[in-house]
Amino acid sequence: MKKKFKLQDLDCANCAAKMEDAIKKIPGVNDANVSFMMQKMTVDAEDDKFDAIMEEVVRVCAKVEPDCKILMK
Amino acid sequence: MDSDIRLLLSKTEDFGMTEKQKKMLGRIIAAFVLFVALLIAEHTGMLENVNVWIQFVVYLVPYLIIGYDIVYKAVRNISHGQVFDENFLMMVATVGAFGVQEFSEAVAVMLFYQVGELFQSYAVGKSRQSISAMMDICPEYANIEQNGVLTQVDPDDVEVGDIIVIKPGERIPLDGVVIEGESLVDTAALTGESVPRSAKAGDEIISGCVNGSGTLKVKVTKEFDDSTVAKILELVENASSKKAKVENFITKFAKYYTPVVTIGAVVLALVPPLVLGGGFAEWIQRACIFLVISCPCALVISVPMGFFGGIGAASNVGVLVKGSNYLEAVAEMTTIVFDKTGTLTKGEFKVAQIQPQGMTETELLEIAALGEGYSTHPIANSIRESYGKTPDMKRTENANEIAGHGISITVDNKAVLIGNEKLMKKEGIAYTPCQSGGTVVYVACDGKFAGTLVISDTVKDGAKEAISAMKQVGVKKCVMLTGDRKEAAMEVAKELGIDEVHAELLPADKVAQVERLLREKPKKEKLAFVGDGINDAPVLTRADIGIAMGSMGSDAAIEAADVVLMDDDVRKIASIVRISRKTLSIVKQNIVFALGVKAIVLLLGAFGAANMWEAVFADVGVSVIAILNSMRALKEK
């Protein structure tokens, strides 16, 4: 399943790249893309564990860039 | 959630600065005033006899005003295991300056850094806005008619078959067919075309366009997710994830750059004083300069931004580029291969020449139109179209089709033969052979040759300019492939100025030709194939760059190609080459500029010739300049 999320206060391009790397390393994540320009994040992960994976995504992102918020739908 | 973001965006637009940026500006001003006061005090000698510790405390006040968040973030991020980020580097650099009793420098550097950061965030925000404004084709609502009452709903909630009403000036929310009303539709956002299209009952209309002055009732034919506007938005948003070689290089480079410079700083701080002896202070200061320069931000932001701007500029002229990598490839394109029909020619047949013998042009055309009155062949259609009137079939009798040859028919009591050369030969007519490129139709009347009609596919408006414009921007070889007859192909090629023609090809031959051309060209140069997207998908994927005619929403073409010409105008190819070259040169300028300045300041720093100010400039100053430079990519037409 692929889902898009908007990001708030993503202020540095280097952090976006670091977040992307960190998300890709989470088990169950097939692909991830953090777009600094669009202030958006796309996560492609296994269906049945998606919610758990997203919690992990939020956790690793907070570690990399605590100021950036992921806006959940 | 969407409305929150919209609110956030509109707020940003109203003030030009976000709340966060305004707060930062306040802090900068406060710290600056204090700092200037302290500088005056220092230079007038007021601080000369003051204890070092008191000086320290006095300078700590503006330092904390301007830099408390940096220190806080640095400490927090270290606890998260994020060591080498900008905050940490700035903290180390300024604390180092405090350590060697360069108080004013510590404050100045932090101040300068924050000013740069503010500029940077402002510039990024502004450019993001202008790019998204350019791509602002997303409809916000649809007016749906239910039981005679109009309600505004989310375009997502409209289903196929629903009737929506589009008022004057509104954006068309979904693809559909007009069932009532008449208007002019502005397609500029999708195609870059400034002349509006007319839309009346029965016409298809495309989402994302803006309605003109009339109200339209439209029956929805596609759900929002399948509609043109949603597809285009998705393409554009995903474009930045397909990275160009330069971008990948920068990402990789950034991974090594920071650690290398940081290690350099450590070496610089420890080795010279240990080897040469003497104080650590001087060398620690030089090491701090290294740390400040160690952030690759200028590159990491400005390179993707340049590409994003280029893609934005392309979409502004009605061309979708599906990724930065394709934009990069277009800049290196030297060979371009065209499929003839639908790309260079319109794919519609027209009577191009009328050469009568012993009668007028009108008479010949009338006889031919009457003779072909019953036929549904495309050639017959084009003759009738050229005649302009509905042929009066009462004037004809005894129509007889001679397979592979033509027709024999009686028109106005005269025996008429209409067909190819073989028919003339078979019936023993003394005809004049015609060498023209198109399809030739011979006409004989009562056993006497009456003349010829030449029917050919018409060349698209602007195809000739397109080819010469491409040559001007540096395309070396224009090749045309077609399934058509050789004569017809040669004629079009001559008219347009094509370098190489291959005619009478089957679809598989086209792939073979493109593969041969791919092998023949130099490795570094790229080949593009331009097709109408119908039955040439294999060639589109095989070429380095597949350029398809979008035909306003033909899904197959949009899927298969890397670059889509939304309004099928081949002239846009030259614009894209220009845009991509400009984008690439901007990206390269930024890389050279940023790395150059950093390298120079690093060198000067190592030999003690650079101060903290120059180091901060090499960091944020360079970033801001590179970002501003990137924005030029958006402006190219």
Image (cartoon, coloured by chain):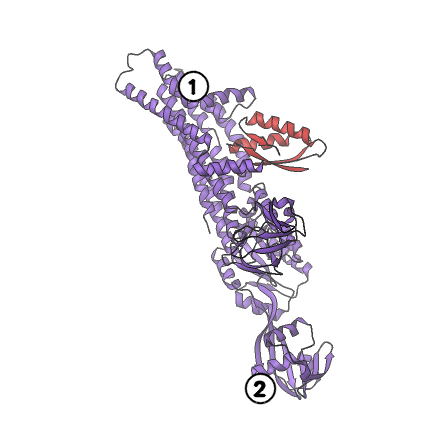
Chain colours: A red, B purple
Report in which chain the residue with disc 2 lies. B
Residue B183 or B443: which is nearer the viewer? B183
Instruction: For mark 1, give the secondary structure.
Output: helix
Q: Is residue B157 left or right of residue B565?
A: right
Residue that badge 1 annotates: B95
Q: Is residue B274 above or below residue B343?
A: above
Type of the residue with mark 1: Val
Instruction: For mark 2, give the secondary structure.
Output: loop
Residue B156 percent across, percent down from the top left: 63, 44
Residue B567 percent across, percent down from the top left: 56, 57
**Can you tell which mark lies on residue A41?**
none
Residue lying at the far front of the rendered structure: B148
The residue located at (53%, 27%) in the rendering is: A67
Residue that badge 2 annotates: B359
- Residue B599 appears anywhere in the view: no
Report in which chain the residue with disc 1 lies. B
Query: In terms of sequence position, does the residue under pointer 1 or pointer 2 come before the other?
Result: 1
Quick one: label 1, few (<14), some, or many (20+) residues within 10 Å? Answer: some
Q: Quadrant of residue B237?
A: top right
